[in-house]
Image: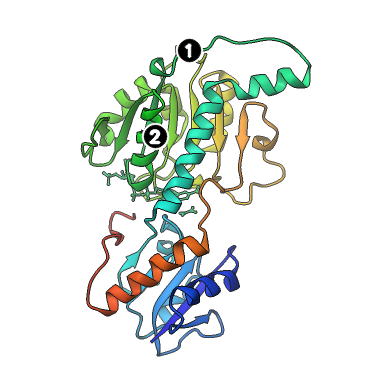
């Protein structure tokens, strides 16, 4: 049994080494040299070339090396086999660190204090209590739920929004289109941890941003997007910052990545840019999970983190 590894933007040798260390007996080969090989039963991928997976006649399952699977599903020629994604404490903790970092920085006026320091200016700003600030988390999956829990532990008022509106202990949850307006109207800091699907593409647009709470304890609403760039209309974000509908933003993901040199987001004083690095997939931490799941499928079991292809996540 052979495992095909196909990664773009990740270091293939590092991943092969980590997968091999997790199961020294496994046969792991690198695409594209080994495409169309009849012995390949599993494909472990990050942004595989379109068409590659349909050349594997005996493929049993596809593994994403991240939590998101939009990079796999955009290949229109995918074979009809289960797709599995990463659900792991290591990745979840990294994302929650990013979310807590960005929420606290906006909440405690990080940008204003950095600018004041550059001017050597001794000045302070009003300091609202966390309990008076509502953080609205869009997407209450593995990542959104953990971030929400950690923000609540810091004392913020936290609410959430998901497709189903499924209850989450300790959280006010709004569901679907019907719950969106109310969710936004209550939100001071919007954290986006949604997957990119046909339903969520372009969701963060002018209408959505103008639905956020206007009179907030921070002086204006804040957007933090670590989901996917395809969720956001960047022109609308810039327009909202200009119009004052939005006060500040932290963006980790972009419509085009790497973010083009000439994007005004790079230089905007109210925008904090990170290069899709909110939660990096660490080979040493995640390879054992992938290999354990392959072993489970070989035993005839199906791991729980299977993607619903129709829903797109
Ligand atoms: P999950 O699949 O566990 O959760 C997805 C959540 O989004 C669920 O709560 C789901 O609702 C909700 N959702 C999906 N579609 C809609 C919709 N149309 N309307 C409202 N809610 C919707 O995903 P994870 O939490 O594991 O990951 C979320 C995303 O984070 C990934 O898909 C990826 O894009 C991104 N990510 C980014 C990283 C980075 O470094 N920037 C790193 C890792 C992930 P319901 O509960 O009803 O199913
Ligand atoms: C992921 C990512 O989906 O890193 O895990 O974006």
Q: Earlier in the sequence, mark 1 or mark 2?
A: 1
For residue 150, the mark is: 2
- Within 10 Å of the Cα at label 2, are there few (<14), some (14-19), or many (20+) other Cα atoms? some
Nearest the camera: 71 or 286? 286
Residue at point 72%, 17% (across, down): 116
Q: Position of residue 6 (x, y in %)?
A: 51, 73
Please tell me in which quadrant of the rendered image residue 166 appears. top left
Most foreground residue, 125 or 274: 125
Q: Which residue is mark 1?
A: 128
In the rendered structure, the answer to whether residue 308 lies left or right of residue 137 reads left
Front one among 109 and 225: 109
The residue at 40%/38% (across/down) is: 147
Residue 227 can be seen in this image: no
Alpha carbon of mark 1 to alpha carbon of mark 2: how far?
A: 19 Å
Q: Is mark 1 within 8 Å of ligand 1?
A: no
Above or below, 291 relative to 106: below
Q: Residues within 10 Å of mark 1 (few under 14, many from 20)?
A: few
Dot 1: element: loop
| Cβ at disc 2 under 8 Å from ligand 1 | no
Look at the numbered discs 1 and 2 and tell me whether their residues touch, using CB distance below 8 Å.
Answer: no
Q: Quadrant of residue 310?
A: bottom left
Q: Position of residue 188 (x, y in %)?
A: 43, 21
Q: Residue at x 47, y 29 (%)?
A: 206
């Amino acid at each position: 049994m052979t495992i095909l590894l196909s990664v773009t933007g990740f270091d293939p040798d590092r991943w092969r080494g980590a997968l091999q260390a997790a199961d020294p007996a496994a046969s792991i080969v690198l695409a594209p040299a080994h495409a169309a090989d009849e012995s390949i039963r599993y494909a472990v991928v990050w942004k595989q070339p379109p068409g590659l997976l349909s050349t594997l006649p005996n493929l049993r399952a596809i593994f994403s090396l991240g939590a998101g699977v939009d990079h796999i599903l955009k290949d229109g020629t995918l074979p009809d086999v289960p797709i599995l994604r990463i659900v792991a404490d290591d990745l979840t903790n990294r994302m929650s660190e990013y979310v807590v970092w960005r929420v606290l920085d906006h909440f405690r006026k990080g940008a204003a204090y950095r600018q004041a320091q550059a001017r050597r200016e001794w000045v302070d700003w009003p300091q609202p209590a966390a309990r008076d600030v509502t953080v609205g988390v869009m997407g209450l999956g593995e990542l959104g739920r953990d971030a929400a829990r950690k923000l609540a532990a810091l004392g913020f008022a936290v609410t959430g929004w998901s497709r189903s509106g499924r209850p989450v202990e300790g959280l006010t949850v709004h569901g679907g289109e019907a719950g969106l307006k109310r969710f936004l109207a209550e939100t001071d800091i919007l954290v986006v941890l949604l997957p990119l699907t046909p339903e969520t593409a372009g969701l963060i647009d002018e209408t959505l941003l103008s639905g956020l709470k206007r009179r907030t304890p921070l002086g204006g609403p804040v957007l933090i997007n670590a989901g996917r760039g395809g969720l956001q209309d960047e022109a609308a974000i810039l327009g909202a910052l200009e119009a004052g509908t939005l006060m500040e933003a932290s963006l980790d993901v972009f419509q085009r990545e790497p973010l083009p040199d000439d994007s005004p987001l790079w230089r905007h004083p109210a925008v904090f840019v990170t290069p899709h690095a909110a939660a990096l997939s660490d080979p040493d931490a995640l390879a054992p999970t992938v290999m354990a799941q392959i072993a489970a499928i070989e035993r005839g079991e199906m791991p729980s983190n299977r993607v619903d292809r129709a829903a797109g996540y």
